[in-house]
Image (spheres, rainbow, N blue to C red):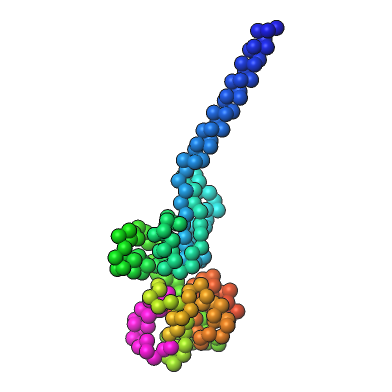
């Protein structure tokens, strides 16, 4: 009888030890998974592959713990990377260039290109069946902060169309994150927006492509 009790206790002890070891291993494996915070400059359809990968657990399958944070403005993304608050930033290349030119020893490194072009769209307050960049002459358009990628791409589009930017009232006073709201608030005749901000804007009647 005593022998059976001792054997029974030993079995229980072995089971308990096994549970503790397994639990410890699982906890250790969880802590061993690298944690990476990604700061996106905007929540956009541009980054659909990332959202799909997160929702379907592809990163976890490859032992990566990814956290996504919205950091509006490439300048703020740069600051967050430099401070260590985020490890990777999704933003325009200009932010890394500005940091480097300012003489930062711990400057940003660009290691991947996510989009081939900047998917900007121009929205008008009126329904324009035919549109060209010539329509902007003499009108006000809000494009985001000066030196930011949306504004730079807009200026590049004007240059390719041989349009003098001085013929257009280009408003740089509104931050990118506030462009849609400012346009709704009656600032500007046109606004330069990305998706999905464009189609959500009440003035949306179809795209005027930049």
Q: Name the quadrant of the N terminus.
A: top right
Which residue corresponds to the image point at 45% horizontal and 71% vertical from the top-left?
A: 119
Q: Quadrant of the C terminus?
A: bottom left
Q: Residue at x 31, y 63 (%)?
A: 104
Res. 46 visible in picture: no
Q: Please provide percent x and percent y for residue 207.
A: 51, 78
* Residue 150 image-quadrant placement: bottom left
Residue drawn at 54 percent across, 51 percent down: 56
Q: Which residues are magenta?
A: 150-169
Does residue 192 sit above or below 90 in this rendering? below
Residue 171 in picture, x, y percent from top left: 45, 84
Query: Which residue occupies the extreme bottom position in the image?
Result: 138
The residue at 56%/85% (across/down) is 186
Residue 39 visible from this viewpoint: yes
159 versus 22 height, above or below = below
| Relative to 105, residue 57 above or below | above
Q: Quadrant of residue 74?
A: bottom left
- Give the prevailing secondary structure in the magenta stretch: helix
């Amino acid at each position: 009888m005593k022998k059976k009790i001792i054997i029974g206790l030993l079995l229980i002890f072995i089971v308990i030890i096994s549970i503790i070891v397994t639990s410890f291993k699982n906890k250790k494996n969880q802590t061993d998974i690298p944690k990476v915070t990604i700061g996106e400059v905007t929540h956009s359809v541009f980054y659909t592959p990332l959202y799909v990968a997160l929702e379907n657990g592809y990163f976890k399958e490859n032992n990566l713990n990814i956290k996504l944070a919205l950091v509006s403005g490439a300048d703020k993304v740069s600051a967050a990377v430099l401070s260590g608050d985020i490890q990777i930033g999704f933003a325009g290349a200009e932010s890394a260039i500005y940091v480097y030119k300012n003489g930062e020893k711990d400057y940003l490194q660009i290691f991947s290109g996510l989009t081939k072009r900047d998917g900007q769209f121009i929205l008008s307050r009126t329904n324009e069946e035919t549109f060209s960049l010539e329509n902007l002459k003499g009108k006000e358009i809000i494009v985001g902060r000066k030196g930011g990628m949306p504004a730079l791409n807009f200026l590049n589009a004007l240059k390719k169309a041989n349009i003098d930017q001085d013929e257009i009232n280009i408003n740089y006073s509104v931050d990118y994150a506030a462009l849609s709201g400012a346009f709704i608030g009656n600032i500007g005749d046109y606004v330069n927006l990305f998706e999905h901000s464009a189609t959500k804007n009440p003035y949306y009647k179809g795209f005027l492509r930049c």
